[in-house]
Amino acid sequence: MKIVVCIKQVPDTTEVKLDPKTNTLIRDGVPSIINPDDRSGIEAALQLKEKVGGTVTLVSMGPPQADVALREGLAMGADDAILITDRAFGGSDTWATSSTIAAALKKLDYDLIITGRQAIDGDTAQVGPQIAEHLGIPQVSYAEEIEVEDGKLIVKRQFEDRYHIIEVATPCLITALAGLAEPRYMTIGGVFDAYREKEVRIWTLEEIKDTINKDDIGLNGSPTRVKQSFTKQAKGVGKILDDVTADKAVQAIVDKLQEKHII
Amino acid sequence: MSKDIYVLAEQRDGEIKKVSIELIGKARELAKDLDQKVVAMLLGSGIKEKAETLIAYGADEVVVVDNPMLAEYVTEPYTKALYEIIENYNPEIVLYGASSIGRDLAPRVSARVHTGLTADCTGLAIDAETKLLMMTRPAFGGNIMATIVCERHRPQMATVRPGVMKSLDKDETRKGEIKIFNVKFTDTDMNVKIREVVKETKHIADITESKILVSGGRGIGSADGFDKLKELADVLGGEIASSRANVDAGWISKDYQVGQTGKTVRPELYIAAGISGAIQHVAGMEDSDLIIAINKNNTAPIFDVADLGVVGDVNIIIPKLTEAIKKLKLNA
Amino acid sequence: MDFNLSKEHLLVKEMFKKFAENEVKPIAAELDEEERFPVETVEKLAKYGFMGIPMPKEYGGQGADTLAYVMSVEEIAKVCLTTTTIYTAHTSLCAHPIYQFGTEEQKQKYLVPLCKGERLGAFGLTEPSAGTDAAMQQTKAVLHGDHYVLNGSKIFITNSGYADTYIIIAMTDKSKGTKGCSAFIVESSFPGFRVGKKEKKMGIRGSTACELIFENCIVPKENLLGKEGQGFKIAMQALDVGRIGIAAQALGLAEGAFEECCKYVKERKQFGKRISQFQNTQFELADMRTKIEAAQLMVYKVARLKDNKLPFSPNAAMAKLYCSELASDVTRRCLQLFGGYGYTREYPIERMMRDAKITEIYEGTSEVQKMVIASWLKIN
């Protein structure tokens, strides 16, 4: 089975802290990682390859430093990788991103495309399904389990209150939840092979010019744009209520929970 | 000219999901600012009768697609139906709940229609000058809020986080129009096969996964004290947790222990009930987004890390808090 | 002289950190408390290639290098010295001598499975009367046709009881002194071999240190490693290589203690402020961090010397000497900054302090290292 896994290099947003003095995010020194959902996608692909044979190709759209994320995937056991990178892609929203990645995928031979459900920086969960639409293939998202049976994928698709067991023919796209597969570590030899034996191909706008519509890329190709962004309120000094009635205290707690959109 | 605010009325087994009711409530507000209508889109099989409910909750119109293809949610038939509705009616705005259905369906529709989509919004408003929909959402792992606009494409689409918008009260006297919309489905539209549908309720036992923790220390008095905490946790949709003291005392299993020798947690809400806040405990929870502490002792070190601290008796305050929240949710 | 790590080394370091954090750290306290050998961790180490990091792929190794090896030891030692003790003894003292001195048959039979982690290695030189005075070998090996018969005992053998492959040094010709020792590859299944008393130790309590007893132990002739009379040289070269691993262990231990201490002093409040805000704390940490920086440079340098096939023995001795004494010093000073809580088993620092001491002793005591360095200085 020819499997393509789309991955994204993201800052580890759980490590990002707020500077209480300036109320801005401290992005320096935040490590870059493979998006967790995507890493599970790589593992699922590797497991499928171990079961039924085939190849695992990694694809990522990002700046040049995303090379490290692809090397990590190669060190886990993927066969080859493609980095889609070009200044022209800067400022892309999910439409432009999915269009660009789909244009690259159109040049590849694949049975199954796996993407992560959502990235921990954008948090949209949109790119996977949009890629499927651009390619005109069926999608199954929120996959908690994937099996292969006679060349078809059998997917456990998770909802809040139920799950479906879905049978889907190839070619198709599946979006992976972090819980889909416990990602293996890179092997030590695998790391050295990733740099010495395996290749990360670089594709710029030039390589996909025959499959992409130039109106769909970058900032100008994006239907949505960010008008404004702001950091959430930094934690101030805590407030302590001493010597109040129980009812007043409960009201204060309820108010706080509502203020923070918890209830 | 695109017009009106369309809301996907999500249903499962014929039951309209709460998020859709919330969205209709919000859509009414936005409609007022635009001087336009609120139209609910109801997709399903044998679903026509539910259209009235949507009107009672604030929709001016309901577009109904009733077809066996739509009995269980599958991406392609639902996408096709919504696409045809949008092409036919040309809405200004389309809203979906950010559920596991909405977040699968909306992006597919947005790509087919070629328009912008903003995910998981916690705020929606109409800009007074431009009349554009301002869609506000958390990004960067929740560390920042971004306001997004979709200027040149229609409809402007957004998925909205459940539990954030406010529903309107049900008003059976409201009047509205119900339109039956026919979609010509073919066999190839069902491009996947549902082998099995299994209904279940999920229970997260892992405290490190829970977004809300109600944690008990010595101050809860006895093992039974956790019952009251469990009630509060349930009503908030969270999990209970514990300090080491109670685990050592055998009141609860070590799986629930937060702290240096237990687990490290960083939930959105950590309620520390009767916990003194010794350094070994604090090390395991100090990165929680919102910390609320209740303790009898006003010098308890937990108050140094709490965003809101209450000096009082946990056994009185927790049950009262549970009641207050239950009341609020009933009235919503 | 490039002090930067290559891309491969930076990426593999990420792997080591994650592995240490997720697979080793969670059970480190338990291994110490229960004096338990981490069988499950050894399986994972084998699976991910830790048991043959610097060995060539053709012999089942990872085809990496000594630098990657010391970095792995450094990262894992930060959280558990027991675990690093197990696989450094295996790699430096058992796999490496076979790689250096073994015949092709011996390499295929033993080195390949050792590197894959299918065999666990150990090294037996130390005897009741032969510690620092390693030449005082009493264990005898006598040739009888197609096999040797070994009689004697070894003590304090790391991995004993779990290892199946031992490099054993025994006297084949007493008249020749150190040139009368030979090295043998002894499998635990050979008749006449048994594991005796298990020592109860101050630290690295999950690592075993048992007695090995040879009672007419039959060792096939083909299992002679190198030539008769080369045993002492093989042992000394093994220890030379081993020293690099020990230095990396001690470095990692010091770094781990330092990191735990920094975390604690930022949280602990006394006299109305965090103890990290007191000058004493800051000066102590600054001093320790400076010495750790020097230690790391020494360890990485000796690894690069070996990888570049340059003489490394004096550097290995200097690194081992410096890092082991630093580990004892740093762990002690960090515990002092923890205060009373640091003395309890709730925090890992007391275990780190107990673990540190052995690095000054095994694979050549600090005094032996000084002998090696002085000899190299030709100061006599």
Image: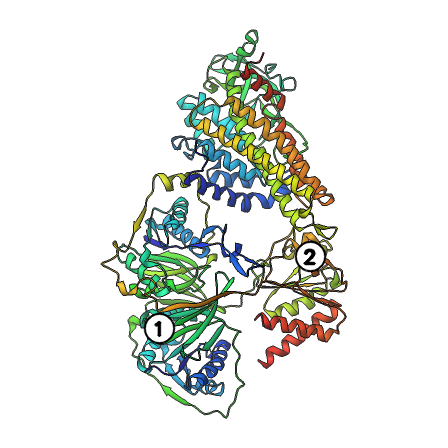
The quarter in which the C terminus of chain C is drawn is top right
Dot 1 amino acid type: Thr
Dot 2 amino acid type: Ser
Provide residue C291's location: percent of width, then percent of height.
59, 34
Asked whether the viewer can see residue C160, the reply is: no
The answer to whether B61 is drawn above or below residue B162 in the figure is below
Provide residue B263's location: percent of width, then percent of height.
62, 53
Label 1 belongs to which residue?
A: B79
Q: Are marks 2 and 1 on the same chain?
A: yes
The disc at residue C238 is: none
Badge 2: chain ID = B
Q: Earlier in the sequence, mark 2 or mark 1?
A: 1
Q: Secondary structure at mark 1?
A: helix
Report how many numbered discs are placed on residues in the image.
2
Q: Secondary structure at mark 2?
A: loop
The disc at residue B243 is: 2
Provide residue B49's location: percent of width, then percent of height.
44, 86
Residue at x-position 62% and y-position 19%: C132
Q: Residues within 10 Å of mark 1 (few under 14, many from 20)?
A: many
Image quadrant assignment for residue B234: bottom right
The answer to whether B74 is drawn above or below residue A3 in the figure is below
Residue at x-position 63% and y-position 74%: A255
- Tell which of A240 and C137 is nearer to you: A240
The answer to whether B156 is drawn above or below residue C294 in the figure is below
